[in-house]
Image: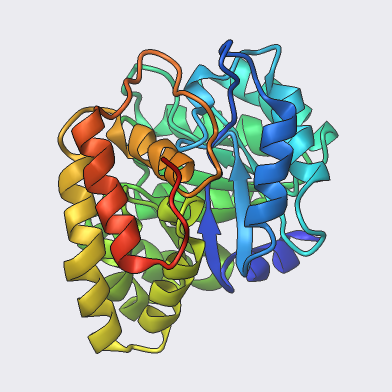
Amino acid sequence: MDYEQLKAKIGSGLLSFPVTDFGADGEFDRVGYARRLQWLSSYESAGLFAAGGTGEFFSIGNDEYDAVIRTAVDNSAPEVPVLAGVGYGTRIAVDLAKRAERAGAAGILVLPHYLMVAEEAGVIAHMQAICKAVGIGVIYYARDNTKLSPAGLEKLTESCPNFMGYKDGIGDLQLMQRIHYRLGDRVVHIGGLPTAEVFAQPYLEMGVTTYSSAVFNFVPELALRFYKAVRARDAKTVDGLMKSFYLPLIELRDRRKGYAVSMIKAGAALVGHGAGPVRTPLTELDASERETLRGLIEAHTVRTMVA
C-alpha cells in the first residue's frame, strides 16, 4: 500500500507492539514468534510494530533483526501492516531501515537515537537520512532524548514525502495540540506513552484517533473493548476499566524500572502465550507481582490461566 493508504490504515484502529519470543537458551524463537503474530493479527488491529520498544528492539542482536522482521511479515494477516522499529545512530538506523524494507515491512518506526541529546537540526537530518534511504512510510517516535518542534516536524513533511506519522511518547498535551494544528492530516498522529490508554480520551479530542496498546499482548479483547469505548465516548466503560484494570496495572508497572516490558511478557505467559524471558538488562517480575498481575487478568477475562 502507498503512504496515504498506510497512513489511513494506521489511523483507523488500535495498534500494538508484539513482544519478541526468546527460548530458554536466550535465542530468538522464530516458531513461537510466528505463532504470536498469527494470534495477534487475528484481532482487529490496524498495525503491528515488530522489534518495537515492547518487542525489546534494544536487545535484539544485529544478526537476529532480519529474521524478526521477516517472521512478523510472513505470519501476520494480509490486511495487518507490519512496521519495523529502527534506532540508534544514523548509520545503524539507515541500515536497519533498508533491511526492514527488504524483509517486507510496510513502514518504519524510528525509535530514539542512542544516548546523546542532540540539537533539532541534527535530529531532522537524522530523520531525513532514514526517510531518503527507503521507499516505505516512516513514523517518528518522540520520547526520552528526542523531541521535535512543530516547525521541525513540518520541515520533515516538506522534505520527505514518505514521512507519514508522528508518535507521541512525551505526554505534553499543549505540544501535541500545537503539532496537530500545524501538521493536520499530513501525518497520522499516534498516542505512544507507556500505558497509552490513560491519555486516550484527551488525545482523541484533539484528533489523535489511535494509540499503541501494550496490553493487547495478553488481553487483546479487553484492549479492543477499551479502544472502542474511547472512540464511542462511552465514559462509563472507560472509567470502569480505568479504575479496575489500567490504574492498578500502572501501579504494578511502576514498581521496578523496565517493567513496562517485563510485565507485558509476564502477562502473555499467564494467558498461555508465553514469549520466554526478557533479556538483560531487564529483570523479571517476582512471584508476588506475577500473582498481582494474575488477579487483574482473571478479574477481567474468562481465559483459563496458566500455572
- Image position, residue 128 (x, y; %): 60, 36
Closer to us: 66 or 258 = 258
Residue 42: quadrant of the picture: bottom right
- Image position, residue 88 (x, y; %): 50, 20
Relative placement, left or right, of 102 versus 46 is right
Q: Residue at x 43, y 31 (%)?
A: 112
- Image position, residue 98 (x, y; %): 76, 28
Image quarter hosting the C terminus: top left
Residue 284: quadrant of the picture: top left
Q: Residue at x 48, y 22 (%)?
A: 58
Numbered-mark total: 0
Residue 252: quadrant of the picture: top left
* On screen, residue 181 above or below 235: above
Relative placement, left or right, of 151 versus 195 is right
* On screen, residue 44 above or below 63: below
Q: Residue at x 63, y 55 (%)?
A: 40
Q: From this viewpoint, is residue 133 visible? A: no
Q: From this viewpoint, is residue 163 visible? A: yes
Q: How is the image coloured?
A: rainbow
* On screen, residue 133 above or below 250: above
Closer to us: 42 or 191 = 42
Q: Residue at x 28, y 78 (%)?
A: 238
Relative placement, left or right, of 100 versus 233 is right
- Image position, residue 16 (x, y; %): 52, 53
Closer to us: 81 or 90 = 81
Image quarter hosting the N terminus: bottom right
Closer to us: 291 or 196 = 291
Relative placement, left or right, of 286 versus 43 is left
